Image (cartoon, helix red, strand yellow):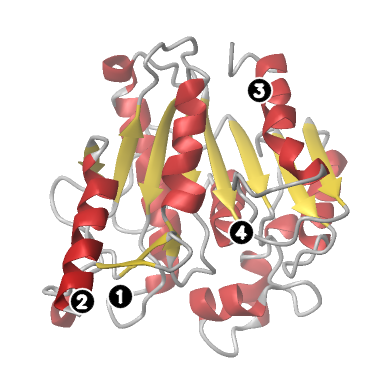
Amino acid sequence: MKKTILILMILSNTVFAQYPVVSLYENGVPGIKESAINTKENVVIGKDGITRINNIMDPSLTVIKPKKKTSDASVVICPGGGYGILAWDHEGTSIGEWFASKGVTAFVLKYRLPQYDLYENAEIRPLQDAQQAFRYIRKNAQKYGLDTEKVGIMGFSAGGHLAASVSTHFDEQIGEITDASISVKPNFAILLYPVISFSDKYAHLGSRKNLLNDNPTIEKIEHYSNELQVKNGTPPTFLVHAFDDGVLVNNSLAYFKALKAKGIPSEMHIYDRGGHGFSMKKSNKGPVASWPARLEEWLRLNNWMK
């Protein structure tokens, strides 16, 4: 058993040591309960090889730079995990590496999950961290050679809900740290099999429960149902979903319909089969495996990738 734990620690250290990491909060992480100050981050590498993280006490950005930068665009990547864990490499660093291979700088967001035993007002912490990521990137754009008007966001599953929340709640300064001089609005968004709606009809109830606890009010449900929050200024969006996904495809359909109703340029790819959580797994077969190529075409067409 001790040998197994040691191996997991070595693998975990390898995962996090490969790229530079910057903390989101220089002067202390807001909202941590005094009783949780000594909590240790929990990292588990499953039998499927996926690294899963929770108990996040130091939200951060893992910076994955291209060896040959051909674009001044960048993207914030939000791994999924039902607001219960982060599928760190599966929907995080592996995606960042794909962007870097195409000449685009990627920032993988290690955001706090809504763990009510760790944080005060836990429901706001994921969105607070995502907004802080945009402040950091735009404030340091010159350092990385980036255009402040070409900062996108990408999210998977519940990370897709977070990315859609950033795309629709950008006019709200979330949490204790505010800075109206720096925009927290993405310039483009990429949503993979996203959780969008918290309505009883379409919601992924596990994600809703994790974010809002049991028995949320109608007002809370509507506030976090992002198909109801699309507005002028919501960024152009690329969506991917499979019809046989347990997170109902209606989530993407409703969001796409809302985007088009506002005249927001958007593209959606619905595959008949693919299930949930396919990401960029090499085992993917059939049409769903083509989604990265479709995304690349969309990014090139809009000058976010050369």
Distance of label 4 from label 2 (alpha carbons): 28 Å
Residue 111 in view, yes or no: yes
Q: Which mark is residue 120?
A: 1
Q: Position of residue 123 (x, y in %)?
A: 44, 71
Circle 3 packing at 10 Å, graded few (<14), some (14-19), many (20+), is some
Numbered circles on residues, count: 4
Closer to the chain start, of discs 3 and 2, is: 2
Q: Which mark is residue 157?
A: 4
- Establish if 56 lies above or below 148: below
Distance of label 1 from label 3 (alpha carbons): 38 Å
Element at label 1:
loop
Residue at screen point 44% across, 59% down: 50
Residue at screen point 24% across, 47% down: 14
Element at label 2:
loop
Distance of label 3 from label 2 (alpha carbons): 41 Å
Q: Amino acid at mark 3?
A: Leu
Q: Position of residue 180 (x, y in %)?
A: 38, 38
The quadrant in which residue 44 appears is bottom left
**Which is closer to the viewer, label 4 or label 1?**
4
Q: Are marks 1 and 3 in contact (CB under 8 Å)?
A: no
**Which is closer to the viewer, label 4 or label 2?**
4
Element at label 3:
helix
Q: Which mark is residue 33?
A: 2
Q: Are marks 2 and 1 in contact (CB under 8 Å)?
A: yes
Q: Position of residue 41 (x, y in %)?
A: 23, 67
Q: Amino acid at mark 1?
A: Glu
Distance of label 4 from label 3 (alpha carbons): 21 Å
Q: Which mark is residue 299?
A: 3
Closer to the chain start, of discs 4 and 3, is: 4
**Which is closer to the viewer, label 1 or label 3?**
3
